[in-house]
Amino acid sequence: MTAHLKIQGLGAGYGGFNVIRSIDLEVGPGLTVILGPNGAGKTTLLKALAGLIPRTGTVLLDDALLPVRQSGVAVRRGMALVAEGRQLFPQMTVTENLELGGWLSTKAQRAERLRRAFADFPRLAERAQQLAGTMSGGEQQMVAVARAMMSAPRLLMLDEPSLGLAPRMVDELLAIARRIADAGTTVLLVEQNVKKALAVADRAHVLERGALVDSGPAAEIAQSDIVRHAYLGVATT
Ligand SMILES: Nc1ncnc2c1ncn2[C@@H]1O[C@H](COP(=O)(O)OP(=O)(O)OP(=O)(O)O)[C@@H](O)[C@H]1O
């Protein structure tokens, strides 16, 4: 079930302007977090990987080249993205939103995955018939993650899942990401909650102005000067 992503010389941006430049990155099994300040290009990186915007360079998923700007192919190959803002259908129920996540699967697969989603997210099972738009921010984020899991991805990309959520909900969502990684799906997480993200991640990369400036095991990155000073508020001595 796990996936291995190999990115070489990746560039991407908007209207001819490259936001990210020549990124080399490997993402293996477990939970990998991308950290970085606002505007560093984290969302752009995930969008480029998902095939939603043009890119240069190569992206290999389990040694097979992923075509540019073909998000359907990326999904078929096992990649799922939970974008910032969740993008649920607010007038549809939780169940209907989840079923849409299984659009590429058979009816039987969809039923089995829905059963599993409700087992993994009991809070959603209780609210199966509730309209997604009436749920709390944290619950909506859970629906978005559960919906992405309906495609049984081997690589799950999460763009700031904890944005705007209360601390307890942030903990819950990061714990969900950890559980998904432990269950065998490779997870690539973009997160602003640096301390909490580093506590659950296996590996971390720091993106600044479109380039990677630090990479390593999460525990080491948590101790690195760049992260301690710029993101964890530790005063320079
Ligand atoms: N659709 C777009 N068109 C033009 N420029 C864009 C577009 N989306 C993002 N940008 C620009 O690209 C740069 C990187 O944005 P991006 O959203 O990737 O950063 P980020 O690291 O995810 O930031 P944040 O943490 O604030 O979400 C920013 O300067 C942003 O203004």
Image: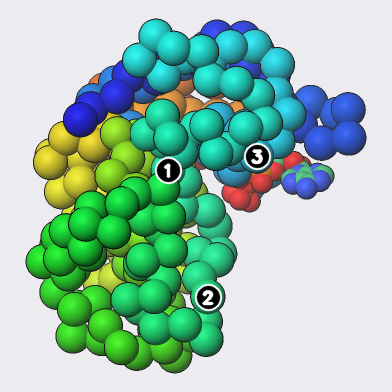
Position of the C terminus, as image quadrant, is top left
Image coordinates of residue 15 in percent, x first then y, are 88, 35
- Looking at this view, name the residue that lies furthest to the front: 107
Image coordinates of residue 97 in percent, x first then y, are 41, 71
Which residue lies under the disc numbered 3? 52
Which residue lies under the disc numbered 1? 80
Q: How far apart, in angstroms, are the residues tagged by discs 2 and 3?
A: 20 Å
Is there any visible trace of residue 191 in the rendered image? no
Image coordinates of residue 142 in percent, x first then y, are 32, 67
Image coordinates of residue 84 in percent, x first then y, are 54, 57
Q: How far apart, in angstroms, are the residues tagged by discs 3 and 1?
A: 12 Å
| Disc number for residue 89 | 2
Q: How far apart, in angstroms, are the residues tagged by discs 1 and 2?
A: 17 Å
- The answer to whether the residue bearing label 3 lies less than 8 angstroms from the nearest atom of ligand 1 is no
What residue lies at 55% left-to-right and 39% top-to-bottom? 72
- Near mark 1 (Cα within 10 A), the count class, few <14, some 14-19 or many ≥20, is many
Q: Secondary structure at mark 1?
A: strand
Front in this rendered view, residue 73 or 117: 73
- Near mark 3 (Cα within 10 A), the count class, few <14, some 14-19 or many ≥20, is some
